[in-house]
Structure formats: C-alpha cells, structure tokens
Amino acid sequence: RTKPAIAVRVVVTRFSRLAVAAVAMLVVAGAIISVAQVRSIVGLTETIYGNRLLFKFVIFAVLMALAAFNKLVLTRRLSQGDAAARIHLRRSITFEWILYALILAAAAGLTVVEPPRQLSLLSAATILGS
C-alpha cells in the first residue's frame, strides 16, 4: 500500500465519523423547524411551502442513502486497499455535491413562499380585521 492511499483512508475514515454527528444535529434542527413552520400534515401536503419541503426531504433522503453506501461499502473497501473503491468514491462524492446543490436550491425556494404557520396567522388577522 502506498502512503497516499493510507492517507486517503485515514482522512475518509475521520471525515465519516464527523459527518455522522453533524448530520444527526442537522436532522434534529430541521425536524424542529419543520414542525414549527408546517404544523400539520395538511400544511405539508396542501401548501406550496409543504410541497417544496417534501421535495427537499426526498433529495435529503437520497443523499443519506448515498452517504450510507459510501460509508458502509466504499469506505470499507477503501480501507481494505481496493483501488477501484477510490474511483467509485470520487464519483459518488461528485454526485453528493450535485445533491447538496439541489438541497440548497430547495432551501432557497422555501424562503420565497409563506410557510403554513404564517398563512394561519395571516388568515386569523384577516378574520379579526373584517
């Protein structure tokens, strides 16, 4: 095994451990914010905001499946010295970046529509103002 291959293996293993903790924190924070903004299944399924949030969730789920594959299969193969795993991991990480960009675009799309929580407040204000 070459020194660069060992270095790559060490970096990938270390990053993998840190990524799991970071993703767990993002999932908890995202769940709390989503519940606060959406408030109901109807808000999730019958509003533009909810539909965009669902789209973001789907992309995130695909990203997590790919990350799990990378961690459980490709990282293990890399640690066993499989040269092809390095190429596959590089391609997979490129696809992950595309998914990250889509998630960022989906998040940006959420900022230009009113969340169901805000729609409820606007509805109540309209009724009270009538």
Image (cartoon, helix red, strand yellow):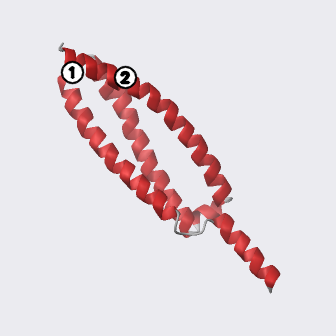
Compared across the picture, whether 112 is left or right of 81 comes to: right
Q: Secondary structure at mark 2?
A: helix
Q: Quadrant of residue 79?
A: top left
Q: Quadrant of the C terminus?
A: bottom right
How far from the left and from the top, in percent, is residue 129? 80, 83
Residue that mark 2 sits on? 13
User: 98 or 4, which is in the foreground?
Assistant: 4
Residue that mark 1 sits on? 82
Q: Quadrant of residue 104?
A: bottom left
| Three-letter code for the amino acid on which mark 2 is drawn | Thr
Q: Residue at x 79, y 81 (%)?
A: 127
How far from the left and from the top, in percent, is residue 64? 43, 40
Q: Residue at x 52, y 58 (%)?
A: 53
Q: Earlier in the sequence, mark 1 or mark 2?
A: 2
The numbered dot on residue 126 is: none
Contact between labelled residues 2 and 1, with CB atoms less than 8 Å apart:
no
Which residue is the extreme one toward the bottom? 130
Compared across the picture, whether 116 is left or right of 77 comes to: right
Compared across the picture, whether 20 is left or right of 35 comes to: left
| Three-letter code for the amino acid on which mark 1 is drawn | Asp
